[in-house]
Image: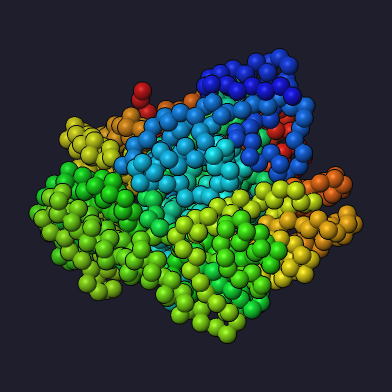
Amino acid sequence: MTEFSPVSAKELARFLRDNSKGERAQVFPVGGRTSLQFLGPQQTTAALLSTHQIANVIDYPARDMTITVGAGMRTSDLSEILANENQELPIDISHNQRATIGGAISCNVSGPRRYGQGTFRDYLIGMTAVDAEGKEFHAGGRVVKNVAGYDLCKLMIGSRGSLGVLTEITLKVKPKQDHLEAVWINCESFETIDLLCEKMLNSATRPVAMEAFTPAACQFVVADARINFPTDHPVMLVFYEGTEKELLWQIGMLRSELDHPGVRSIEEVGDESSILLLGTLTEFPDGGDVPATFQANMRPSRVASFLEYCTSRNISAVARLGNGIVIGHLPDDIGHEAQKSVLNELSAHTHNDGGNLILLNAEEPIASELSWWGRAEQSWSVMKTIKESLDPSGLLNPGGTPFE
Amino acid sequence: MSSTTESSAEQLIRRFRDVVGEDGLLYRPEELIVYECDGYVVEKNVPDVVVFPRTTAQIIELVKICNDLKVPFVPRGAGTSLAGGTLPVGGGVMITLTRMREILEINYRDRYAIVEPGLVNVHLTQALKGSGYHYAPDPSSQGACTLGGNVATNSGGPHTLKYGVTVNHVLGIEYVSPQGELMRLGGPQEEMPGYDLTGMFVGSEGTFGICTKIWVRLTRDPAAHRTLLAIFETVKDATETISAIIGAGIVPAALEMMDQGIIAALEEAFHFGFPLDAGAVLLIETDGLEVSVEQDALDIERLCSENGAREVRRAGTEAERQLLWKCRKQAFGAIGRLSPSYCTQDGVVPRTKLPEILDCITESSERHGIRVVNVFHAGDGNIHPILLFDERDPEQIKRVMAASDEILNRCIDLGGSVTGEHGIGVEKISFMSRLFTENDLEIMGRIRIAMNPTGCCSPSKMLPTAGACGMEHIERSHPGKQAHA
């Protein structure tokens, strides 16, 4: 597999232009390569186009709370630059020492704090990209509010480089929060968790994340974050951010609001452990050596029963309770047919509610026997039309979209 | 010049009548005059027919008839667009959605509501009152504008400083494509595989089809808020305060500025007790937990005083707070006391460039002899200079256009944009080639063709090359604003 790492957007554009006029090789854009294991086997014949050297700060007017950087900037570097001005991009990105901001946007990465802080849709305000023919185009700008022209920024988020290669990113940023604190809530059952979620809808507190685990995931989380909390029952985890005063008040309030017989214990995780825990949950989708990893998308009200089912099948699953997203790893002690059957049952569970189940990662033979992108949606035909209009020869990230 | 011949117009009306009945149609000249323009009054053109569907099935039929007869059509909500977004350029059919105004579902457990496009924004807010939830985007016109219109223009409002604009609160859209197919993007689930077409549909100014159903995100009400009115001798002091507040890392829920000209009109209309001798006032609202909101308010008061505020008042009661917001949101209604016509601009600059753009507005006002008053979303850098004139005087219209051009061109020069929330419409088409490169416009053009192959849906909007549907020959009565390099 050939690889090219341009040092500038111009060089990248030249590469794509020359390719489109010459060899017409299929091109696989990459950043920090932290999501390559997700969503199907990589096209081994495609040329790798890495943006990691396009990593400069282009403009950082900190008082305007926006920043423009090269798409290849590592997200940890971006965090450090922002932290110097007491600002942050509050999106949890896995492998942030390697992940690039362009790659994270292209894969629409998010983590636990998406519940309270949002996703890239809420922060990407401008971008420059290069299409398959080497033509540079941009959308949005460097102001926080702008409705001129079609919002191509939204189109590029999660497009996995299939419409163009991001070279420059402008983000809206936020003041950095002082502290993070997690509260570990040991519950009798998933039914209790469902009830607590309902209570949280009218909580006086404002969590930034609400997570729940199956027992199998719980054991992993505790070990990975090096914390010592009960794992024998279903667990709900609530994260808060803010000043010490805000956290103290909110945790006290949470304790009184969740006073319920189904709650076995409520424990504060502590400042440092909360950060470790957030990191563990952010990295959770990268499950390592498991037969299959999935992401199920559903309405939040369906999550508790979905977790209950996962528990019955010994699946290690973490749920974004407020967002209706569950990420799970299949156990490796069941056979291939059983794995397929479980995945089909999980798919049916999500489809019944209009949701979807995506295979993030799978070993053979599941990888070639099941649909990676779940049930086909009507909107895929529109996506296909858009793809064909922007990349008519299908040169960018072949096989990287659901409709192909 | 009409785009339909008399016989095709008759056929159109007959077939439309079969779909929506006689009471769902307007086609007599005296009835159509109301629809000759929207909130952008500088350009006018009557549609050939205005039709009022009540159901999605009727919209599908109407669109298919338009396709059969090759007649252009434009969707319209309440017609509050300030950029001519619903102007029927070249005539054709106007599909008005105000009879599709139901709230189809409110689901607090999953924090969404499903609404029809003709629902008035504030009616959703009213329906949610007392639940602990609200729909966050609150355009100043929320008492009249529809959610379908908000989707088309990606509307904002004062509280978008903290809560984001329409696109940040839309989960899914059902629409009738320009070919008459019913399509759905997204839904109550937050994430689905593939491209974020919902995000791209929002702000497409009606050029991708006719929205028939919207899934909107419900947002928790703030636990507490403090609403402050800071009074300044000069506009400069007020704008420096804005920079100081944001620079200090405080993001209020809303940060609005009103200058002396608009204060006088508001005081006359609402008798709030605004100081008539003030150069500018800032309306600042901070919200959050009760335990922290007071400290934010104290910090903001301190920053206001340090930057020359002569007085900072607090809304002492909810009624006082509501009155303050009523003044702000109905500011445009008070302008009738100042002049018979007005034209509102919608430029955006980086927040720290507000002093420069306000200087530019003052200079343009003086140079062209057009009075300008300002009421705008200062925290976002989203200016709304209101140019006052009499539309019966063509000379004044020319000067208004010239002053507007200068202001918007200066926004671009300062690193901003010509529209923060009103859209391009027909008004600002000529600026697109200054804001965007040929490549950018070509890409947008390709997307438009992918979504709207014949160009019959909302022709001549947003893109300079958008003339289609046999309308390339159409000349607009006013050429809109002009960009200069």
Asked whether A291 or B442 is in front, the reply is A291
In the rendered image, the vertical position of residue B483 relative to residue B380, given as above or below: above
- Splitting the image into 4 quarters, where does residue B344 fall? top left
Q: Residue at x 49, y 35 (%)?
A: A169
Which quadrant does the N terminus of chain A fall into? top right
- The total of numbered circles placed on residues is 0
Q: In this view, does A400 lie to the left or right of B45?
A: right
Which quadrant does the C terminus of chain A fall into? top right
Residue B412: % across, % down: 36, 32
- Splitting the image into 4 quarters, where does residue A350 fall? bottom right
Say if residue B203 shows up in the picture: yes
- Which residue reaches farthest bottom? A261
In the rendered image, the vertical position of residue B388 relative to residue A225, given as above or below: above
Residue B300: % across, % down: 23, 57
Q: How is the image coloured?
A: rainbow
Asked whether A198 or B93 is in front, the reply is A198
Residue B393: % across, % down: 26, 40
Residue B56: % across, % down: 65, 60
Say if residue B145 shows up in the picture: no
Q: Residue at x 61, y 55 (%)?
A: A224
Asked whether A118 or B326 is in front, the reply is A118
Q: Residue at x 78, y 48 (%)?
A: A362
Asked whether A23 or B203 is in front, the reply is A23
Q: Is residue B144 left or right of residue A222?
A: left
Q: Which residue is drawn at 55% across and 77% down?
A: A265
